[in-house]
């Protein structure tokens, strides 16, 4: 069966100086099957959010999709006319963001906003039927006493409840794909765990596919089937989530694993990745990670490495992998 | 004989009035942001204060630094009661306790170059010559891993991690004994977080600094702190040696917090590969 989403050779670019273009997403290939979750992990400047906006058809101008294809359920999205894309967005592909307060309108009740989301994609429905559906949508995201909370304004809700409302709106039209961009980053740890559990439950109930974008490798491996690690606009490693922490090949993925404290060796130095992510206007030659890589050698600077397969489900963009074979 | 702690906080509280009404605001009641907390911090020690939003951890930081007046309780710094100090007497102690903020950009004046930013506490607390300031700024930049030439640049020319290094250099300028770190790595990318945590660790070892390390991040607090206090609704619900607290939390809320921590650890080939990377 064809995957639900198939991205190939995607390049999303912004105008640069001297008439050139700066690619913030540069040659990304990814696929996602129905009902599955792909986790996109990366730091700021990795291109992960621009990748998700590309799928949504929401690349902010003057940015544009300069090359590649995004096939969604057989349809090529990059060439879809604007009205058709708008119809698809919300109904078949929905998105939730990090900061629910900025995505909700403070002047309207949450009920009015959910109803608006439902009505935007459905033919005329009676007002009381819409209201019942909005209450059901809140119930589905486990907001207690939804018949009363529906008339609340966003500021009357906690951060976690606001994110639940955003999820209710996103799911109100039963999308096939939910894109969640850092959905729990602004939330307290205990609330974060609740929202992630809710997303998993809803996915089981609806069979939707998810694209989860996060800087947090722990969250992504916990939630996803497959993980794609992005660095400087490219996917540098793709692996099953279940084996990422035991089988990761790319020195950047390994660096991310080592950078976050995980309980071992308290108060010892962490194995940090030195330096910082390059700007799109100053991409290093060859492997884009080489200036920060402890294992870089002249060949890494001379030519850009291609994705290489390591087993049936894993691939990494590193010519030195597997690195345990490097002699001490 | 154990020496007296650098910082002793006893029964510290801070209540805020809740007011209603725009023109004739009436006091409707009080809320305790910090409610009768006590702790000590030894020289060279890191005490982690962990809690969720609204737990009172940041108010605690501001109280300890005397940026906010307590409603009750005492603060002793190096044996002196600083709770009621003001003016020159307070300023003498302020030099000895500094703060590093979460958002390094918001806390740096965009119109000052980095040299001026770092020299400011020197001018305030360490009278000296311009040449002396310049030399000290260069020394401080080197200490936090930046090049002395970068003194002439402005904050916007730096990345988030570099700005946090600048914030740390400024905090170190006055040669403090205590640094309150208020979510110092929360706004940073994971790889940069590790760099800054390593820097704070190295500085503590070299300079014998005490840290009051405030964070919402359990994994970070577990890594940096010798002891941890868990705060909830203005109170310390549990305080213990870090290893003991994480191994056997006694308080129900602490257990709830720990259960919410993602628990993945590297294993298999990744362990071998990390060893290769560590060798470089």
Image (tube, grey):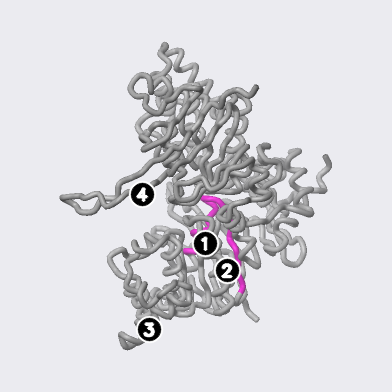
Host chain of mark 4: B
Observer-side mark, 3 or 1, equals 3
Q: Which mark is residue A51?
A: 1
Query: Of label 1 and label 2, which has the lower sequence position?
Result: 2
B80 and A216: which one is in front?
Answer: B80
* Image coords of residue A301 (percent x, y): 67, 43
Q: Which residue is drawn at 43% across and 68% down?
A: A166
Query: Of label 3 and label 2, which has the lower sequence position?
Result: 2
Q: What stretch is highlighted in magenta?
A: A36-53
- Reply above or below: B230 against A268: below
Q: Residue A7 carries which label?
A: 2
- Reply above or below: A48 against B65: below
Observer-side mark, 4 or 1, equals 4
A233 and B206: which one is in front?
Answer: B206
**Local secondary structure at mark 4:** strand
Report which residue position mark 3 lands on: A132
């Amino acid at each position: 069966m064809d995957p639900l989403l198939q991205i190939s050779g995607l390049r999303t670019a912004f105008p640069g100086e001297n008439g050139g273009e700066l690619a913030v997403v540069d040659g990304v290939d990814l696929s996602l099957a129905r009902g599955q979750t792909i986790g996109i992990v990366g730091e700021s400047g990795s291109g992960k959010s621009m990748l998700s906006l590309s799928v949504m058809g929401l690349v902010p101008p003057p940015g544009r999709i300069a090359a590649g294809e995004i096939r969604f359920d057989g349809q090529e999205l990059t060439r879809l006319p604007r009205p058709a894309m708008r119809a698809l967005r919300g109904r078949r592909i929905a998105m939730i963001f990090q900061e629910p307060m900025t995505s909700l309108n403070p002047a309207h009740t949450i009920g009015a906003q959910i109803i608006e989301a439902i009505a935007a994609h459905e033919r005329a429905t009676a007002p009381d039927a819409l209201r019942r559906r909005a209450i059901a949508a809140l119930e589905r995201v486990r907001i207690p006493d939804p018949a009363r909370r529906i008339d609340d304004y966003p500021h009357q809700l906690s951060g976690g409840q606001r994110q639940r409302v955003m999820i209710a709106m996103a799911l109100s039209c039963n999308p096939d794909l939910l894109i969640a961009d850092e959905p729990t980053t602004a939330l307290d740890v205990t609330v974060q765990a609740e929202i992630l559990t809710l997303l998993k439950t809803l996915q089981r109930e609806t069979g939707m596919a998810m694209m989860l974008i996060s800087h947090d490798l722990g969250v992504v491996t916990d939630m996803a089937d497959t993980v794609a690690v992005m660095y400087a606009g490219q996917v540098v490693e793709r692996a099953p989530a279940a084996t990422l922490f035991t089988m990761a090949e790319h020195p950047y993925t390994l660096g991310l694993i080592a950078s976050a404290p995980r309980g071992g060796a308290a108060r010892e130095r962490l194995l940090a990745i030195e330096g910082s992510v390059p700007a799109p206007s100053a991409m290093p030659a060859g492997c884009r990670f080489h200036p920060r890589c402890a294992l870089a050698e002249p060949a890494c600077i001379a030519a850009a490495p291609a994705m290489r397969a390591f087993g049936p489900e894993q691939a990494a963009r590193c010519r030195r992998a597997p690195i345990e074979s490097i002699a001490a | 004989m154990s020496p007296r702690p650098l910082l002793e906080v006893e029964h510290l509280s801070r209540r805020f009035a809740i007011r209603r009404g725009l023109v004739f605001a009436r006091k409707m009641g009080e809320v305790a942001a910090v409610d009768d907390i006590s702790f000590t911090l030894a020289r060279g020690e890191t005490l982690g204060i962990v809690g969720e939003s609204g737990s009172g951890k940041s108010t605690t930081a501001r109280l300890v630094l005397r940026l906010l007046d307590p409603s009750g309780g005492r603060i002793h710094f190096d044996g002196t009661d600083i709770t009621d100090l003001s003016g020159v007497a307070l300023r003498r102690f302020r030099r000895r306790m500094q703060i590093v903020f979460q958002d390094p950009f918001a806390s740096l004046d965009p119109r000052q170059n980095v040299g001026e930013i770092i020299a400011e506490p020197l001018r305030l607390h360490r009278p000296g010559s311009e040449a002396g300031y310049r030399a000290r700024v260069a020394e401080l930049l080197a200490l936090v891993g930046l090049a002395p030439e970068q003194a002439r640049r402005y904050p916007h020319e730096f990345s988030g991690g570099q700005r946090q290094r600048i914030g740390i250099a400024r905090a170190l300028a006055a040669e403090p004994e205590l640094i309150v770190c208020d979510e110092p790595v929360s706004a940073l990318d994971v790889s940069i977080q590790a760099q800054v945590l390593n820097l704070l660790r190295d500085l503590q070892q070299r300079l014998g600094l005490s840290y009051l390390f405030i964070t919402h991040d359990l994994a970070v607090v577990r890594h940096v702190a010798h002891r941890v206090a868990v705060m909830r609704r203005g109170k310390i619900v549990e305080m213990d040696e870090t290893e003991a607290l994480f191994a056997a939390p006694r308080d129900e809320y602490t257990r709830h917090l720990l259960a919410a921590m993602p628990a993945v650890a590297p294993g298999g080939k990744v362990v071998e590969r990390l060893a290769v990377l560590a060798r470089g």
